[in-house]
Image (spheres, rainbow, N blue to C red):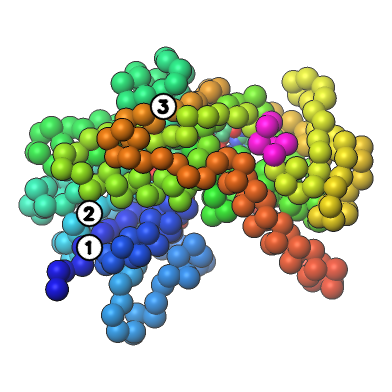
């Protein structure tokens, strides 16, 4: 019997980490993930795959750790001896990186170096394959449309600058030490598991809550921003594929289509049975309900204003447009995204609607419902 492959995932408690862990377990891997110590439980996205560690034949293991802690990373790598390392851990929010630039650099840039150096220190650089979660944010002020592997970078946030260091240190370890190390330059990807303060999830969650009378208005920043949004499930499949090649390489992963934040709001509202009309300009722009269909939005009335602009959500430097060209991934790896932005948006809205309905029911029966992250991010 052949030995199961062993994978180590940093950021396993995040959106991508949870989908990747599922995928690798399906493929028969033994999967180890690094989770951070937090004052409350932070494993919600992987709880469904976690087995009691007293059970036999355990395939999924969690280790306490942090990308800021070299000795911890070295010990975990030494104990786990992974065939594949997926570095998905990061302070991943662009707006937050303007508020915490030093921490973002420490985790996203230095954290990547710490992992690579630990692999080298342990003499595993010829046996352990390394995947780095690089990002379309590297393109920032775009130099070419659409963006591909050869498009020059111009990062526009502390997050993107930190990820640029990570990108190049991965290339450098590949060139210097012959490591199998690659960058997936992933464009935005979302899902029902997307963090609640990224714009898509903020929108689907707010639309669901508003439709159930739990919130009254969604406040957004730059609604003109254009993004190439794909589904996280499609994108983690590609992360695995990148480590199964003979030669390590870097790939752009994108759908090749873009829509604006405003269009994503309209799509989400439509899925909840609400047609919106945007009117006004700049800070005065609002979205008004034009018509209501179905029975999801009984708490609402035609003419209600449910989206407004709040300059708090503008960024010191904005990335206005991102559109990827995934031709290389399609040609060399045979990867094609299977889920459209419309399908993804529908899945996210339905997921948030079912949560909102549960909250509304609790509220109707006198229970207090904490909407603690309302309109953050
Ligand atoms: P998430 O924010 O959902 O997950 C980030 C993960 O990193 C979480 O598990 C988080 O832990 C962990 N983490 C944060 N800080 C540290 C730290 N100091 N040490 C160890 N782990 C840490 O991100 P996604 O899953 O969406 O993205 C995965 C990766 O891909 C990230 O690196 C992101 O920057 C990158 N990326 C994402 C894109 C996207 O559109 N989703 C696009 C391009 C790149 P905790 O749960 O405790 O917070
Ligand atoms: P990013 O592409 O990694 O920054 O992902 P986000 O989902 O955080 O943001 C996508 C785009 O939506 C950016 O151009 C943001 O400026 C824009 N945006 C507009 N309003 C908001 C908001 O309220 N929250 C967030 N997170 N982004 C917003």
Which residue is labeled 3 in the image?
A: 325
Check if residue 212 falls in the magenta segment: no
Mark 2: secondary structure:
strand
Residue 63 left/right relative to 121:
right
User: Do labels 1 and 2 touch, CB within 8 Å?
Assistant: yes
Reading the chain from its start, which is encountered first: label 3 or label 1? 1
Residue at x-position 41% and y-position 27%? 325
Reading the chain from its start, which is encountered first: label 1 or label 2? 1
Instruction: Decide: few, some or many residues near mark 2? Use Cα within 10 Å; few <14, some 14-19, many ≥20.
Output: many
Quadrant in which residue 283 is drawn? top right
Which residue is labeled 2 in the image?
A: 84
Q: Nearer the viewer, residue 289 or 365?
A: 289
Residue at x-position 27% and y-position 35%? 332
Q: Nearer the viewer, residue 358 or 70?
A: 358
Mark 3: secondary structure:
loop
**Ligand 1: does it lie within 8 Å of the C-beta at label 2?**
no
Magenta stretch bounds: 262-267
Please state the horizontal and vertical placement of residue 278, each as a whole percent of the image: 80, 28
Ligand 2 located in image quadrant? top right
Instruction: Decide: few, some or many residues near mark 1? Use Cα within 10 Å; few <14, some 14-19, many ≥20.
Output: some
Q: Nearer the viewer, residue 344 or 123?
A: 344
Q: Characterize the magenta stretch by its predominant secondary structure.
A: helix
Q: The C terminus is located in which quarter?
A: top right
Residue at x-position 47% and y-position 69%? 47
Please state the horizontal and vertical placement of residue 60, each as a whole percent of the image: 33, 70
């Amino acid at each position: 019997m052949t030995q199961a492959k062993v994978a180590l995932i940093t950021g396993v408690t995040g959106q991508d980490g949870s989908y990747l862990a599922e995928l690798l377990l399906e493929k028969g891997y033994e999967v180890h993930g690094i989770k951070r110590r937090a004052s409350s439980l932070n494993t919600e996205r992987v709880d469904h795959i976690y087995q009691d560690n007293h059970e036999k034949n355990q395939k999924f293991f969690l280790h306490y750790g942090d990308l800021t802690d070299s000795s911890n990373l070295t010990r975990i790598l030494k104990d786990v001896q992974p065939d594949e390392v997926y570095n998905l851990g990061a302070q991943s929010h662009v707006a937050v990186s303007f508020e915490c630039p030093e921490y973002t650099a420490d985790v996203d840039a230095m954290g990547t170096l710490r992992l690579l150096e630990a692999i080298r220190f342990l003499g595993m650089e010829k046996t352990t394959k390394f995947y780095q979660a690089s990002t379309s944010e590297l393109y920032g002020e775009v130099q070419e449309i659409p963006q591909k592997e050869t498009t020059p970078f111009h990062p526009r946030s502390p997050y993107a600058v930190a990820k640029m260091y990570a990108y190049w240190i991965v290339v450098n370890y590949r060139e210097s030490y012959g490591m199998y190390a690659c960058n997936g330059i992933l464009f935005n990807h979302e899902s029902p598991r997307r963090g609640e303060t990224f714009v898509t999830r903020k929108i689907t969650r707010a639309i669901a809550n508003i439709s159930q009378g739990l919130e009254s208005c969604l406040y957004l920043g730059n609604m003109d921003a254009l993004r190439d949004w794909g589904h996280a499930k499609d994108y983690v499949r590609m992360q695995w594929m990148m480590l199964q090649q003979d030669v390590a390489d870097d790939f752009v992963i994108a759908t090749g289509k873009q829509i604006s934040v405003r269009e994503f709001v309209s799509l989400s509202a439509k899925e909840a049975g609400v047609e919106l009309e945007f009117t006004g300009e700049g800070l005065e722009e609002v979205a008004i309900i034009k018509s209501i269909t179905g029975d999801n939005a009984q708490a609402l009335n035609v003419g209600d204003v449910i989206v407004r602009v709040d300059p708090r959500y503008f960024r010191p430097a904005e990335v206005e447009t991102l559109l990827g060209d995934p031709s290389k991934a399609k040609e060399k790896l045979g990867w094609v995204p299977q889920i459209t932005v419309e399908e993804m948006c529908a899945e996210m809205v339905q997921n948030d609607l079912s949560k909102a309905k549960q909250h509304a029911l609790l509220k109707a029966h006198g229970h207090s419902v904490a909407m603690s992250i309302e309109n953050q991010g």
